[in-house]
Amino acid sequence: MRKTIFLCLIVLAAAPIGGAAPIRVVTSLQDLASIADSVGGERVETFSLAKGYQDPHFVEPKPSFVLRLSRADLLIVAGLDMEIGYLPPLLDQSRNGKIRPGNAGYLDASTGCEILERPRGIVTRAMGDVHPFGNPHYWLGPGNGRVIARAIAARLSQLDPPGASEYRANLARFEGRLAEGEKRWDAALGPFAGTEVVTYHNSWPNFLKRFRLVAAGFVEPKPGIPPAPAHVVQLVNLMKQRKVPVILMEPYFDERTPKTIAGRTGARLLTFIPSVGGVKAASDYVALFDHDVKVLADALRVATRP
Amino acid sequence: MTVFDVLLPAFVAGLILTGIHAYLGVHVVERGVIFVDLSLAQIAALGATIGYLFGFDVHSDRGYVFSLMFTFIGAAIFAFTRPRHSTRIPQEAIIGIVYAVATAGSVLAMSKATRETEHLKEMLIGNVLSVTWNELGHIALLYAAVGAFHWFFRKRFLLISMHEDDAVRQGISIRFWDFLFYMSFGFVVTSSVAIAGVLLVFSFLIVPSVSAMLFTDRLGPRLAIGWSMGAIVSAVGVYLSFVLDLPTGATIVATFGVALLLLAAVRPLVRRRRA
């Protein structure tokens, strides 16, 4: 493994720029890399900074990240301040003008996507925890996956005009797979429309909205900051009263608090995978939804059995 | 851009950190206030968080003023709680209490923030891999100034750190000089943590100083050993982090640990030859 990495880096260091080399795409999320792979096919080579099992808000930088960025032709970010904790200094360090914001090598995947909870007007304390640009977990709605794929196809065609027809064909194939997937997912979750769920953090609004589920509350409104006791009591009462069957949580958060709450309410704590690569089964963007939808549908079926 | 370009800033950062921290580490170890840097860094973080609560961004000038003000308050606390012979409360206890309360304070402040705080912790703690030349120039100047200040008053600072009783006998105002010491120390630690992270700064402060004490008690050789060790460990750590593709800061810290073990292993040989 070590040797492979080392060899890879040497090859990277020696690879000449230009020629028939693949378009080098670096993404912040593995989901974006997966979509870029689907659209780019053989013509691109993708690398994701955050792996699917990591908290995408912060990634521990490694030397290879800077090298990858310095040689990238296209950087695709989730935007909405998702990467602000680690990417800007790495981008400075890479000294790669092509992938700076505003240039053709920089693509903010959130552009054109349906972004929820974008605050309007003046932000006040009464509104609670606010993301100034809206909720950054938007790729968890399959409709946004389609928007992202189209944007990537358009940008790749711009950077690599000879590949345009190939990108178009790949995009059509991806959209076809996604449409088929949506039929499956609608069929699985359709019977549970309107069901109330609790999520660990407010990271699933696009997913819930798409499948007509409702977030009844959140365990930790701010990740890393334990909820106040009054909040826990309120949440437990609310869940009992409305018979909320499940709590959804990402694998990288601490499960002690949600476990306690699940124990007191009889709800099931489900590990929901937020990104491609979070578990083996979630091997690409479509498989990610296949996995999550199955986990949720199975649990809801058990919970609603008379 | 080559591998060298990627790793050079991290290595230079290691050299700059070694320069000031190996020296301050001698004071810190002599005084037995090992965790004072963690405590001061936490106070600075509390200041930045509270500044953020008032709407000043972490990396803005006003945000910096906030964290600096809190650091000075911390310096005052440590200067005025220096234990005398009559008390049995060790200063490490005070340092630990300040650390815990400041950490809790940051958590409370973040829980009251209206803006998102998911990134705040990461923004306060730097990463040595992503340090820029600009930042390096900035801290090089700052540390040179602090270094010059300590060089100018070296007799006082060293006397208080190493022979407190003599200093008292000479009628030196220990509290005043302690305040100056912790203030200058806070200046350095706050900036270092912002570019290199807590773990790395702690290692640069303590490990070279402790390693040198294995071999000598004299100040000159101690500094020479500490500086050489810091420089070598920086180079080796940065190189290893590249070859193994591991996070750079943590690799340097682990390298410090291994280097200390190696030095401890050769110590008996050196001592025997001398005897």
Image (cartoon, helix red, strand yellow):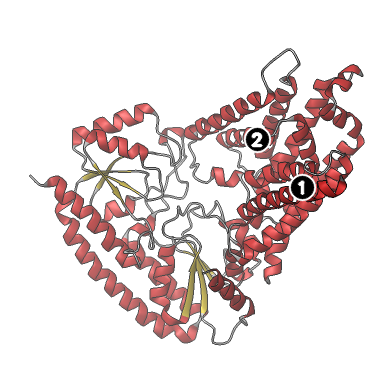
Same chain check for tags 2 and 1: yes
Residue labelled with disc 2: B44
Label 2, secondary structure: give it. Answer: helix
Q: Amino acid at mark 1?
A: Pro
Number of callouts: 2
In the picture, the disc for residue A293 is none
Residue labelled with disc 1: B268
Rendered residue at 20%/66% (across/down): A183
Kindly indicate the quadrant of the structure image that contains residue B55.
top right
Regarding residue B138, the answer to whether it shows in the image is no
**Crowding at mark 1 (Cα within 10 Å: few <14, some 14-19, many 20+):** few
Regarding residue A148, the answer to whether it shows in the image is yes
Q: Where residue B96 sits in the image (x, y, percent)?
A: 61, 28
Give the alpha-carbon distance from disc 2 to disc 1, as whole Å.
41 Å
Q: Where residue A107 sits in the image (x, y, percent)?
A: 50, 66
Q: Chain of mark 1?
A: B
Q: Nearer the viewer, residue B63 or B185?
A: B185
Q: Where residue A120 sits in the image (x, y, percent)?
A: 42, 45
Label 1, secondary structure: give it. Answer: helix
Which image quadrant: the C terminus of chain A?
top left
Q: Amino acid at mark 2?
A: Ala
Q: Chain of mark 2?
A: B
Q: Nearer the viewer, mark 2 or mark 1?
A: 1
Query: Is residue A236 found left or right of B161 in the rendered image?
Result: left
Kindly indicate the quadrant of the structure image that contains residue A237.
top left
- Looking at the image, residue B56 lies above or below residue B173: below
Rendered residue at 27%/38% (across/down): A262
Q: Residue furthest top?
A: B86
Rendered residue at 46%/35% (across/down): A124
Query: Is residue B168 found left or right of A248 in the rendered image?
Result: right
Rendered residue at 70%/14% (across/down): B87
Q: Where residue A305 sits in the image (x, y, percent)?
A: 10, 47
